[in-house]
Image (cartoon, helix red, strand yellow):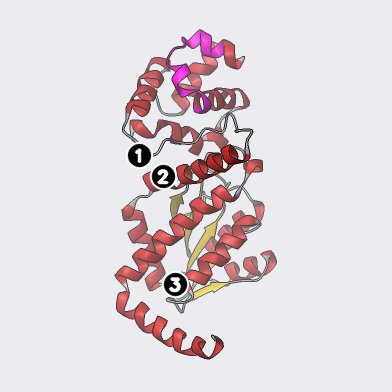
Amino acid sequence: MKTTDILNKIRLQYNQLTKSQKKLADYSLNNPHKVLELSISDLAEICEVSDATVFRFCCDIGLQGYQDFKRTLADNLDSTQTIAPASSASKPASTEGRLEHMLQKNVSALYETKKLINLSQIDIAIDWMSSAEKVLFLGVGASYSTAVECYNHFARILPSAAIALDTHMQIVAASTLSSKDTAIVISYSGSSRESVEMAKAAKMRGARIICITHFLKSPLTLYADLVLLCSTNELEVESHSITSEIAQLFIIDVLFQEFYRKNKNQCKEIQRITSENLLPHVY
């Protein structure tokens, strides 16, 4: 993780922080410039935690202490960024202001997700999808709609794409995979019990597991062979919004475009066949 990604790193590790550390994370994410002006005791007092908690927080996010945190944060803020992350600290009162805030929030999620994309991991994911006898898309709740959208994308160019209708049938489908198959599990939090059970069932059958999620470590990532991270400014799972879906869909679109590019002739032929069969259904 580059120093310029320290704020994003805090977001990715947010679910692993203690209650007191989350106070420090919230304040740092919402007031990064103010933190640079504070001593360790000042920050501790503002967040109502001890100096030792501040030090442990810095160490837990991979730094050597508070001064290293401030130096890294300063590098982060001084870095040239085409888009500044949208702060969720204060929401405008006017409708126009709220619309602008929502726009910046969504654009920020895309920008931060783009920084997290590892192209070598994308290549591996595409290789697994290309060679799999079945590519099963899985997700529950809001992530199920994202999984359906993912299936709708790939069904037009990938005959092995598959999805089940409900949570129970998804678990059944995951339980019938083999070592020749790939499961793509989508979960923002990575801690949904059903999503974890699906991944566990697929893993026990020897299938390769790709998960699209937000947090670096979660119950879901324990079963994943490949983790594709999406970023949003949503810190708590309960605050899930369409922003997280937009970030997930961005990763899916990257997978789709790269899959198409690497399998262009095959994809074009499948598209031709599907288009011919759909033609009678279009006015």
| The C terminus sits in image quarter | bottom right
Where residue 153 sits: x, y (%)?
48, 70
Which residue does the image show at 49% across and 20% down from the upper left?
56
Q: Which residue is mark 1?
A: 82
Among the two numbered marks 3 and 2 on one chain, the one whose residue lies closer to the N terminus: 2
> In the rendered structure, does residue 227 fall within the stretch colored magenta?
no
First along the sequence among labels 1 and 2: 1
Q: Which residues are magenta?
A: 29-44
The residue tagged 2 is 111
Q: Which mark is residue 180?
A: 3
Residue 39 on the magenta segment? yes
The quadrant of the picture occupied by the N terminus is top left
Distance of label 1 from label 2 (alpha carbons):
9 Å
- Mark 2 surroundings within 10 Å by alpha-carbon count, few (fewer than 14), some (14 through 19), many (20 or more): some
Residue 151 visible to an observer of this rendering:
yes
Asked which quadrant contains residue 163, the reply is bottom right
Q: Earlier in the sequence, mark 1 or mark 3?
A: 1
Q: Amino acid at mark 2?
A: Tyr
Is there a contact, CB below 8 Å, between mark 1 and mark 2?
Answer: yes
